[in-house]
């Protein structure tokens, strides 16, 4: 019973937090919001590049990496082969 | 005939690197470039000081933006508005990870790849935001029809385009618009013959768009006021 109550409480806290976050993201000025999204997209590219580099250092093949990223082997190779050896 | 950088531009970069080393920062960003601009003994330093951007005040703000720099501080504020915590996002937490180019760079101008590698080998390395500002500043000097690239061009670009500089100016309580107007009044474009003026106006808007696009591509940040640059080229 106690476990059930704790789980219900955790769920309600999570729902409140998500709602508050949604509120914050929609109530922001579109000018600021759009700039933030553009920056986030570039940061996501940066994170992807860092993760691919880490996987290559760990000996992963292009095929393995492409599978996890949901793209073809050629795409991931074309995008990141020029970074090989520059880390 | 365009003759490249004035020695004063090199001095700005030397002061910026000196400031980053003194503060023990891992990279040279736009906040250090501002310190370099304000630390000179010229009209530009007076203009900046009139708006509260003195060398000491700027170093204090640079200290607050460390270690990731003013650009990242501006990013953190804007991303927080859409519920993203930048500190958690940067998994490696390494300042240099923000200064790696992700997208392939255009072929022209030739030699830009080796120039970037040289910038990365500085001690401390020159950040992508500072590199982007320098490139844009050179393009602005060309668009104005100047014979030399001078520190005021760097100041114009930083105040018009860079979100990190905007963050610094907000911290100092400086009115960015007021600073831009003061720069425009103090450093008008050079007088040229009607033929040169005509040639310059022909591709003006294309040049400005190109300048902003390249700046955004290098830094990975949206510029804050691309329209503000227009007044520096043709008032």
Image (cartoon, coloured by chain):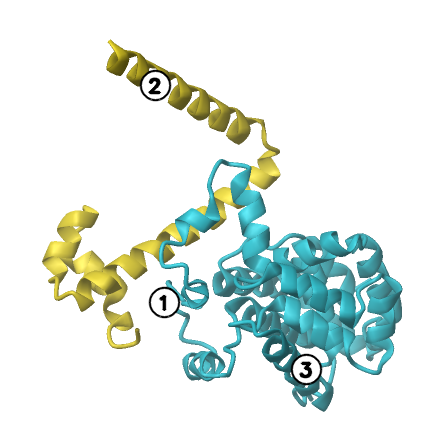
Q: Position of residue B63 (x, y in %)?
A: 64, 64
Give the side of residue B69 with respect to residue A74, left or right: right
Q: Give me the C-alpha separation between circle 2 and circle 3.
A: 54 Å
Q: Nearer the viewer, mark 1 or mark 2?
A: 2
Q: Which chain is cyan?
A: B
* Residue under disc 1 on the same chain as residue under disc 2: no
Q: What percent of the width, then of the height, locates residue B114?
A: 42, 84
Q: Chain of mark 2?
A: A
Tell which circle, 1 or 3, labels the residue nearer the N-terminal end: 3
User: On the picture, is A28 further left or further right than A85?
Assistant: right
The residue labelled by disc 3 is B15
Q: Residue at x 30, y 76 (%)?
A: A86
Q: Residue at x 39, y 23 (%)?
A: A14
Within 10 Å of the Cα at label 3, are there few (<14), some (14-19), or many (20+) other Cα atoms? many
- Residue placed furthest toward the front: A2
Label 1 is found on which chain of the structure?
B
Q: Secondary structure at mark 2?
A: helix
Other-residue count near label 2 (Cα within 10 Å), few / some / many at <14 / 14–19 / ≥20: few
Query: In x, y percent, where is residue A37?
Result: 48, 43
Q: Is residue A65 above or below residue A78?
A: above
- Contact? badges 1 and 3 (CB < 8 Å): no
Q: Which colour is chain A painted?
A: yellow
Residue B104's disc number: 1
Q: Are marks 1 and 3 on the same chain?
A: yes
Quarter of the picture containing the N terminus of chain B is bottom right
How crowded pointer 1 is (Cα within 10 Å; few <14, some 14-19, many 20+) is rated as few
**Residue B96 or A6: which is nearer the viewer?**
A6
Give the SS element for disc 3: helix
Q: Quadrant of residue A35?
A: top right
Find disc 2 in the rendering and name its residue. A11
Q: Mark 1 against mark 3, which lies toward the viewer?
A: 3
* Residue B199 visible to the viewer: no
């Amino acid at each position: 019973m106690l476990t059930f109550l704790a789980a219900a409480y955790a769920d309600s806290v999570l729902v409140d937090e998500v709602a508050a976050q949604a509120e914050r993201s929609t109530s922001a000025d579109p000018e600021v919001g759009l700039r933030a999204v553009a920056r986030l997209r570039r940061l996501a590219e940066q994170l992807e590049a860092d993760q691919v580099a880490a996987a290559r250092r760990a000996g992963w093949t292009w095929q393995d990496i492409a599978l996890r990223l949901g793209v073809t082997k050629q795409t991931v190779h074309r995008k990141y082969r020029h970074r090989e050896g520059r880390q | 005939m365009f003759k490249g950088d004035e020695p004063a531009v090199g001095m700005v970069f030397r002061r910026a690197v000196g400031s980053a080393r003194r503060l023990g920062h891992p990279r040279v960003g736009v906040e250090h470039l501002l310190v370099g601009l304000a630390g000179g003994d010229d009209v530009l330093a007076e203009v900046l000081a009139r708006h509260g951007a003195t060398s000491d005040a700027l170093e204090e703000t640079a200290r607050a933006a460390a270690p990731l720099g003013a650009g990242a501080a501006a990013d953190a504020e804007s991303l927080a508005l859409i519920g993203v915590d930048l500190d958690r996002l940067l998994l490696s937490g390494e300042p240099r990870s923000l200064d790696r180019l992700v997208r392939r760079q255009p072929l022209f101008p030739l030699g830009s790849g080796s120039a970037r590698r040289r910038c990365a080998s500085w001690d401390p390395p020159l950040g992508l935001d500072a590199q982007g500002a320098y490139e844009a500043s050179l393009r602005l000097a060309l668009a104005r029809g100047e014979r030399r690239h001078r520190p005021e061009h760097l100041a114009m670009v930083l105040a018009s385009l860079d979100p990190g500089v905007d963050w610094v100016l907000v911290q100092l309580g400086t009115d960015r618009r007021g600073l831009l107007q003061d720069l425009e009044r103090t450093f008008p474009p050079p007088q040229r013959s009607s033929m040169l003026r005509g040639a310059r106006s022909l591709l003006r808007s294309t040049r400005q768009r190109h300048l902003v696009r390249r700046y955004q591509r290098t830094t990975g940040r949206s510029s804050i006021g691309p329209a503000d640059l227009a007044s520096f080229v043709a008032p």
